[in-house]
Image: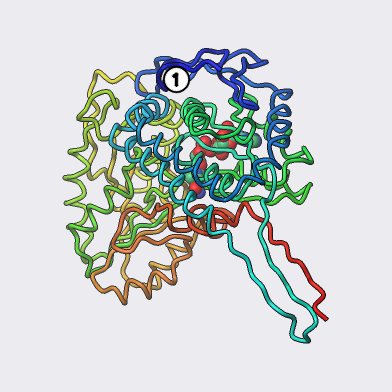
């Protein structure tokens, strides 16, 4: 098998679909991958059709029993080697992420580290293959409880974290003994293909991971969900698409994990350390240009500190450097598409129409040619503005003030989404008491970042089903089986 000398070499069309350890041409030709920072073409990728979608499942099904029979230590070793390879190639991977997603160089570097850590974490988890042993209350029976891999897993990932959303699924699936078919987002397939190269280099047997870039996302995924050999769907993306896939998965009563949209509140109490809160707010809001499912979407600041919070935040937002990742000073990259920019402008306009004011807008250098939107801080935003009610997925921070905790909680929990939340208070007991009332799967307390491979990532309500990371993330790829043994 031929390999390009470096990961960032342009992939040739004949290498784009990765099935059964082979790099194949796409049956439906190729498609271009655009750099949103300048609209240049950064890669040409094979476009898989439905025949290849099924061939990917053929390969995963064929590899399943041999991979399941590899010892936990053997599987762990492959994962650990992949972790090291990702770090060895961190610069190239970060460049690739920036090229196809647009995110700033520091954000892309941080994503590579985060993404690689899932391989290390699950290399360690892979060998903790325990079970349970008991006897029935009446005696005469021994119960042996064990875990088995759920089977071939279909993994569908979004464009906003092209590396981490793939590894957060692939690593636990492999640790559990599953084989997988992966469909990366059409905007960002190059990173997933690069990770497949590293898995290959790490000694992963052919067919255990198959990567299918395609423009026919809906048809390819449906083909997988209808294939009786596929036993699991793990999806990360919008709630809208998640609902459609959950309905499709229900036909075959498929085991499904769903990591969906968010609308994270960022709460600042009257006794919060405002410097820390503003630091946390900048991280929670502007990491990846606000295009994170955990991004702080609405800032609820107590009225007694709102003026000061907005003033300090305005200084920070005005000073943000916007530009392509190729310019070292850039802190905020472009949005993923022109459509995303236009939709975000609509949200800003709606808030301004309802009486909000622009408290700060970062400078947008005139030489930029990509899909840029100037980072914006909005103050005096009414709680019912669309920018508060909907997932923004862009660099806009709306500030709403609150007076009583009852009002605050009504606003915070008055949404069907419940992924992340953030809370700043100097009184830890008060913070915990408040946090327990927040309907979110993850609450950062005096922290602007909740993502951590050792912690269970996931949402309440329509933000999803299941968890990724931690022990829980492994269980998503396992079935429980027990043996009832006659002991009389
Ligand atoms: P998306 O739902 O449009 O796409 C996600 C994936 O599904 C992509 O691979 C896409 O090609 C595919 N897809 C799109 N339509 C499909 C269909 N009808 N059938 C099958 N597959 C289909 O989401 P996106 O725009 O790529 O990502 C942004 C969204 O993802 C945001 O809502 C964000 O909050 C969410 N997200 C959630 C998490 C989480 O962990 N909860 C993490 C990252 C992103």
- Count of numbered badges drawn on the protein: 1
Residue 151 vertical placement versus 30 (above, below): below
Residue with the mark numbered 1 = 34
Residue 411 vertical placement versus 262 (above, below): below
Residue 419: x %, y % from top left: 48, 55
Looking at the picture, the colour scheme in use is rainbow
Quarter assignment of residue 181: top right
Q: Nearer the viewer, residue 337 or 199?
A: 199
- The residue sitting at 31% across, 69% down in the picture is 403
Quarter assignment of residue 276: bottom left
Residue 97: x %, y % from top left: 40, 29
Q: Nearer the viewer, residue 303 or 444?
A: 444
Residue 488: x %, y % from top left: 83, 81
- Tell me: 487 left or right of 452: right
Quarter assignment of residue 153: top right
Task: Point out the quarter of the image occupied by ligand 1.
Answer: top right
- In the picture, the quarter occupied by the N terminus is top right
- Tell me: 368 left or right of 239: left
**Callout 1 secondary element:** strand
Residue 243 vertical placement versus 97 (above, below): below
- Tell me: 423 left or right of 224: left
Say if disc 1 is inside 8 Å of ligand 1.
Answer: no
Quick one: label 1, few (<14), some, or many (20+) residues within 10 Å? many
Residue 158: x %, y % from top left: 51, 37
Residue 167 vertical placement versus 58 (above, below): below
- The residue sitting at 19% across, 64% down in the picture is 273
- The residue sitting at 79% across, 41% down in the picture is 228
Q: Nearer the viewer, residue 246 or 192?
A: 192
């Amino acid at each position: 098998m031929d390999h390009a000398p470096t990961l960032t070499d342009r992939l040739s069309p004949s290498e784009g679909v990765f099935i059964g350890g082979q790099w194949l041409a796409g049956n439906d030709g190729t498609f271009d991958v655009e750099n949103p920072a300048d609209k240049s073409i950064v890669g040409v990728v094979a476009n898989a059709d439905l025949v290849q979608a099924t061939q990917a499942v053929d390969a995963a099904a064929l590899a399943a029993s041999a991979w399941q029979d590899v010892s936990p230590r053997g599987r762990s070793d492959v994962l650990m080697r992949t972790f090291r390879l990702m770090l060895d190639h961190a610069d190239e991977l970060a460049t690739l992420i920036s090229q196809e997603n647009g995110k700033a160089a520091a954000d892309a570097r941080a994503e590579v580290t985060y993404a690689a850590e899932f391989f290390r974490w699950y290399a360690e988890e892979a060998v903790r293959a325990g079970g349970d042993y008991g006897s029935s209350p009446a005696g005469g029976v021994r119960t042996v409880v064990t875990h088995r891999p759920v089977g071939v897993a279909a993994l569908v990932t979004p464009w906003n974290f092209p590396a981490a959303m793939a590894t957060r699924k692939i690593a636990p699936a492999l640790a559990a003994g599953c084989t997988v078919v992966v469909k990366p987002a059409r905007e960002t397939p190059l990173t997933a293909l690069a990770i497949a190269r590293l898995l290959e280099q790490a000694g992963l047997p052919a067919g255990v991971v198959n990567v299918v870039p395609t423009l026919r996302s809906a048809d390819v995924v449906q083909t997988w969900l209808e294939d009786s050999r596929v036993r699991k769907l793990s999806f990360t993306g919008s709630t809208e698409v998640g609902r459609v896939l959950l309905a499709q998965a229900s036909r075959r009563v498929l085991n499904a994990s769903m990591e969906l949209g968010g609308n994270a509140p960022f709460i600042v109490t009257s006794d919060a350390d405002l410097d820390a809160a503003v630091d946390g707010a900048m991280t929670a809001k502007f990491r990846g240009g606000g295009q994170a499912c955990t991004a702080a979407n609405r800032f609820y600041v107590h009225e007694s500190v709102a003026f000061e919070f907005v003033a300090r935040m305005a200084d920070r937002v005005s000073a943000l450097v916007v530009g392509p990742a190729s310019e070292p000073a850039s802190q905020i990259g472009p949005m993923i598409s022109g459509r995303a920019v236009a939709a975000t402008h609509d949200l800003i306009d709606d808030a301004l129409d309802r009486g909000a004011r622009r408290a700060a807008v970062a400078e947008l250098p005139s030489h930029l040619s990509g899909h840029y939107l100037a980072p914006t801080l909005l103050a005096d935003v009414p709680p019912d503005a669309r920018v508060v009610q909907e997932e923004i997925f862009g660099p806009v921070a709306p500030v709403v003030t609150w007076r009583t905790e009852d009002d605050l909680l009504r606003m915070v929990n008055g949404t069907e989404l419940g992924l992340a939340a953030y809370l700043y208070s100097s009184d830890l007991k008060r913070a915990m008491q408040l946090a327990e009332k927040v309907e979110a799967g993850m609450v950062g307390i005096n922290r602007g970042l909740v993502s951590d491979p050792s912690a269970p990532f996931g949402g309440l309500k329509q933000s999803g089903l299941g968890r990724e990371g931690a022990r829980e993330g492994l269980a998503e790829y396992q079935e429980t089986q027990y043996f009832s043994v006659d002991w009389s």
